[in-house]
Image (tube, helix red, strand yellow):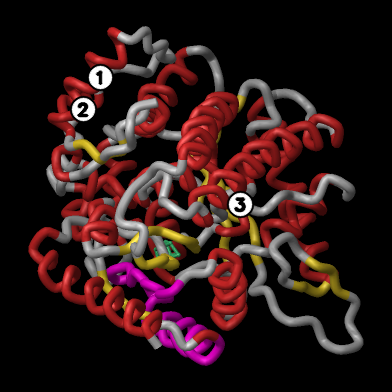
Amino acid sequence: MMAPRQLTLDEWESRYTELVAGGLREPAYGGPLRRHLEDGDLRLPRLCYDNSAAALRLWNFLLTEEDRLHAARAAGKKIVGTMKDLGTVPVIAYAFPNLVAFYPDGAWWIPCVMELSTGLLGIADALGIDESFCPVRAMLGAFLTGEHFPIPDLLTCSVGATCDDFSAIAQRLNGLGYPILWWEMPARRHPDSNESSVSLPGGFVAPCDQVELVASELERIKEALERLADMRLTDDDLARGIAVANHARRQLAELRRLVFTAEICPMPALEMLIAEMLAIHFCSDREETIQVFDDLLEEVRERVRANVGYFAGDAVRVFWVNPVADLRAMNLLEECGGRLCGTEYLFCHALDEIPEDLPPIEALARMALADPMVGPSSDRALRICRDIEQFEAEAVVIARIPGASHCAYEGHIIHDVIQERFGIPVTEIEVPPISDALRPTLRTRLEAVMEAARALRRR
Ligand code: SF4
């Protein structure tokens, strides 16, 4: 096993040659990372990467999604653009053999990965969706240029308990001639004392009425998918789809457990963020996601067994809240003396196992209602606290998302709940899609929170 070391994109050139000479076997989307620069992924030279073949496969898988979607269409499959629910509708779509689902919301990261070279945010500006909205507005430009993903055969979007940003942007998209099949997601509320309720994956509780409503909405989505696929989906088919999704979720749960609890960090924060993102729609290939997780798990298990990894043994154990618009911030965390020990990237419900002992649509409805963004911020804070405890985090970084409507208030709530419960340092930083100009400020904020966490150790 090669000793873990973070590499620049240039350093990956010789590492790749070495791996190939050593007999590396790659899937069809494999190859040197540098080639993605030709696709305009200009941010890549600014990032640091894990040096394992498993990480290489992860990055290549992520960066070839657009090709995969085009190949699926060329092979006669129908493409479903699922929006906002982050982890629910794709489970239904992938239960059909001839459907592929992806999140157009993923355009969120295009301004970062392509270093603002595509003009997507300018297109959104011209449509009246300016920087007072979160980076998901890049999705509008991606639809209008048609350059970043194939235009889906069907678009679905959850609405109701949705952030104002997404709601406004999706409505604008609909008005521009991209019809959307909306489905209702109620705001999850605590059941009244005399109301029948059920437990949701992840530990929240919801009134049965709300579960029934979401189940009926998902039934409607399933019927639309059946029409698109021109075939019926039985409960057994859907149950099998749920079982495969759960397999991937268990793999990811094990990967997170190993990485966040190991004495020495076996896998850097950036690769772990990418791995978590695969959970929401399998990066447009469910079976391959499972293979990518297999490789990552094998690498991490080996590193944990050998007690090798990254960063000084005293790296501060950091819990990270919200995804970052600029991926480079995950490298910065480690440069400032931290390591990732717990995350909540807005889609923890996509990580929880879906119940397999219920009618499948009801099981999915329960999972969808466990979305941390459809309930009170105080619920989300309590779930974060539970994970902080599990992974023994010593500090918390809340990454504010520029323009995001929920970030105006939730940070304070999460901060106060964590402070009251654990008394550990919590900081809020705001990370724009390209954060280079803010790097000194971000560094200072992160170094300060590490220092505060170390000071607590000495008490
Ligand atoms: S505002 Fe937040 S929840 Fe809404 S789309 Fe943006 S990042 Fe997602």
Q: Nearer the viewer, residue 63 or 251?
A: 251
**Residue drawn at 33 percent across, 37 percent down:** 4
Left or right: residue 343 versus residue 44 is: right
Q: Label 3 vs label 1: CA separation?
A: 31 Å
Q: Residue 169: tell me if it is visible.
A: yes
404 falls in the magenta region: yes
**Residue drawn at 42 percent across, 87 percent down:** 412
Left or right: residue 381 versus residue 454 is: right
**Label 2 lies in ligand 1 vicinity (Cβ under 8 Å):** no
Left or right: residue 145 versus residue 155 is: left
Residue 371, position in %: x, y? 61, 63
Residue 15, position in %: x, y? 23, 22
Residue flagged by tag 2: what amino acid is it?
Trp
Look at the picture and state if 75 lies above or below 258.
above
Residue flagged by tag 1: what amino acid is it?
Tyr
Q: Residue 150: tell me if it is visible.
A: no
Residue 79, position in %: x, y? 52, 30
Which quadrant, please, contains the N terminus? top left
Badge 3 is on which residue? Answer: 351
| Category of crowding for the residue at label 3, using alpha-carbon neighbours closer than 10 angstroms: few (below 14), some (14–19), many (at least 20) | many
Q: Nearer the viewer, residue 182 or 5?
A: 5
**What stretch of residues is rendered in magenta?**
394-421
Quarter residue 117 falls in: top left
Residue flagged by tag 3: what amino acid is it?
Leu
Label placed on residue 12: 2
Badge 1 is on which residue? Answer: 16
